[in-house]
Amino acid sequence: MIKNKNVDLKNTNKYYSQEYSNCFSDNIGKFGIDKDKFDFLMERLKKGQKKLKSDKESGARYLNIIDETDDIQELQEITQEYRKFDDVIVFGTGGSSLGAEALNQISKITKGIGYPKLHIITNIAPYTYQKVFSKINFSNAGCIVISKSGATVETIMQFLSIVPNLRKAVGSENLRDRITIVCQSGDSPLRRLGKTHNIRIIDQDPNISGRYSVFSVVGLLPAMIVGLSANEFRIGAKDILDDALNNDIYSVAPAIGSAIQVGLMEKNINNSVLLAYSDRLGSLSRWYRQLWAESLGKDGKGSSPTYAIGPVDQHSQLQLWVDGPRDKFFTILRTEQDVQTVKINDEYLDCMDMEYIRGSSLIDLTNASCIATYQSLYKSGCPTRLISMLDTEVSNMGALMMHYILETVFSAYLLDVNPFDQPAVEKGKKIARDLMTKAKT
């Protein structure tokens, strides 16, 4: 049994709640985690908590960046420059773009009223390029190029593919006013490009891995351009980190999530499904997917993250989830407050025998579908937690993203892997470079 008898099976703070009682074998049967295993892992995480404190005190940048304010002040002037544009294109891949896209999607601000439209280009598909760029007036557009190393080939080719459009529209002499490069200091292709053509360069912190960089300039600059408060974003993260550092480990939500997931891995539940019941949370799910996969997938360890969007994916995958292989842990993510939709028109209901939807809205159906899926999963014996964002303000987003960062780091501690490197990714990049080189010979 859980040693801390006062532990609640639902964590709640002012940003989100985490209901996790339906992850335990006592509640759902043999595919849940046993409470003695959970207790064992939580006791181990007391040392993990001490290590986290030590990392914070020793200056770990991914943790300490949220305490800073000077960098936000420095970005304000650039932010104002970019707000004069109708369109801003952000080039980046993986950790250089997924966090910014999550923040852009969660924004409550109506685009086009005082703010530019943000286009975050994460891939190199020609169709996407043609679709996006055909609608952009490059004479009133700016772009941001983000690559920590300054050598990410996808990002460089993304950028070089539109330089002719931009140069034709504004002239080579005006590119500095339209382009910002974000990369770490030291020699790199992008930094050489910036120096050669007098393009503005912002230093990216070399001590923050890309997938942990959402609280740095990588996530902040695009978010600030569309009006999100960088200070509020960091405040939410800081509150969650303070809780994780100073509270009893049994009340630390990210530690609890970590113990549950790692304990389930030991039962061969090696898939982690994040099912978000809001289109506005879809990019958050994709950001989480990289964070979890690239941080933990080492030495034959880890679990495979999958993102899904409800209600559409409950129709396409719930059959498999409930009645297929029992190798999945589910996190259902929802917002308790969202944009209210207009209620349906009731005048045609009389002949349809569907009185249960009279007076309802699409949000009502989304919420009912969410809870129905949650109950379907755990009542079928699938380990399932429910995370409810209490609002979609940017501070809530900061809190939830810090939760996932800490849950990942705690899990790495339990699995004894380094959450900050990605040796297999670097190997793949080298192979791609060799293939491109051979194609030219």
Image (tube, rainbow, N blue to C red):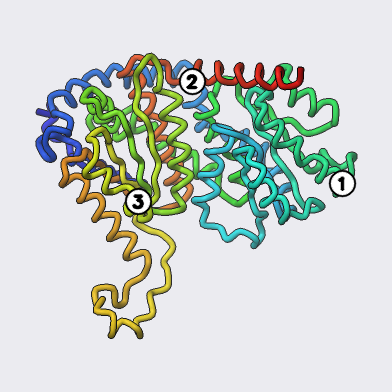
Query: How far is mark 3 from mark 1, CA to CA?
Result: 46 Å
Dividing the picture into quadrants, the one containing residue 321 is: top left
The kind of residue tagged 1 is: Lys
Apparent side of residue 218 relative to residue 192 in the rendered image (left or right): left
| Structural crowding at the residue carrying mark 1, measured as other residues with C-alpha within 10 Å and reported as few (<14), some (14–19) or many (≥20) | few
Residues at circles 1 and 2 in contact by the CB criterion of under 8 Å: no
* Image quarter hosting the N terminus: top left
Apparent side of residue 327 relative to residue 395 in the rendered image (left or right): left
Q: Nearer the viewer, mark 2 or mark 3?
A: 3
Q: Identify the mark at residue 168; answer none if there is no mark.
A: 1
Q: Nearer the viewer, mark 1 or mark 2?
A: 1
**Residue 429's spot in the image, x, y percent?**
59, 20
Q: Which residue is mark 2?
A: 60
| Structural crowding at the residue carrying mark 2, measured as other residues with C-alpha within 10 Å and reported as few (<14), some (14–19) or many (≥20) | some
Q: Which residue is mark 3?
A: 316
- 3 or 1: tag closer to the N-terminus: 1
On screen, residue 330 above or below 249: below
